[in-house]
Image: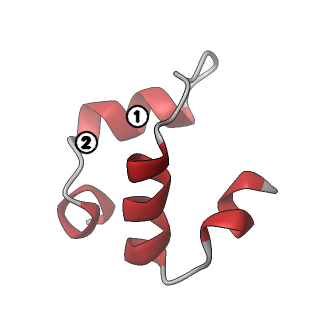
């Protein structure tokens, strides 16, 4: 599960995916990118 690999609470990931996502910290973007095996910039171009 992404939340486990990225070490981020699954409820926070649900908020990120929701209608009004919170502003993400660089650390969070980096964790998600590592878990998904992509560069952080690829997440920002979403």
Taking the view exactly as shown, the residue that stands out farthest to the top is 20
Callout 2 environment at 10 Å: few (<14), some (14 to 19), or many (20+)? some
Instruction: Name the residue beneath numbered marker 1.
Output: 14
* Marks 2 and 1, how far apart at CA: 6 Å
Q: In the rendered image, which quarter contains the N terminus?
A: bottom left
Q: In the shown orientation, is residue 21 left or right of residue 27?
A: right
Q: In the shown orientation, is residue 11 left or right of residue 43?
A: left
For the residue pair 46 and 30, the one nearer the viewer reads as 30
Position of residue 22 measured from the top left corner of the image (x, y, whole percent):
52, 21
Position of residue 14 measured from the top left corner of the image (x, y, whole percent):
40, 34
Taking the view exactly as shown, the residue that stands out farthest to the front is 26
Position of residue 41 measured from the top left corner of the image (x, y, whole percent):
71, 65
Circles 2 and 1 in contact, beta carbons < 8 Å: yes
For the residue pair 23 and 21, the one nearer the viewer reads as 23
> On screen, 6 above or below 37?
above
Instruction: Name the residue beneath numbered marker 2.
Output: 10
Callout 1 environment at 10 Å: few (<14), some (14 to 19), or many (20+)? few
Q: Quadrant of residue 46?
A: bottom right
């Amino acid at each position: 599960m992404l939340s486990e690999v990225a070490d981020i609470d699954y409820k926070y990931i649900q908020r990120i995916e929701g209608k009004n996502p919170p502003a993400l910290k660089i650390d969070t973007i980096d964790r998600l990118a590592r878990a998904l095996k992509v560069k952080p910039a690829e997440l920002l171009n979403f």
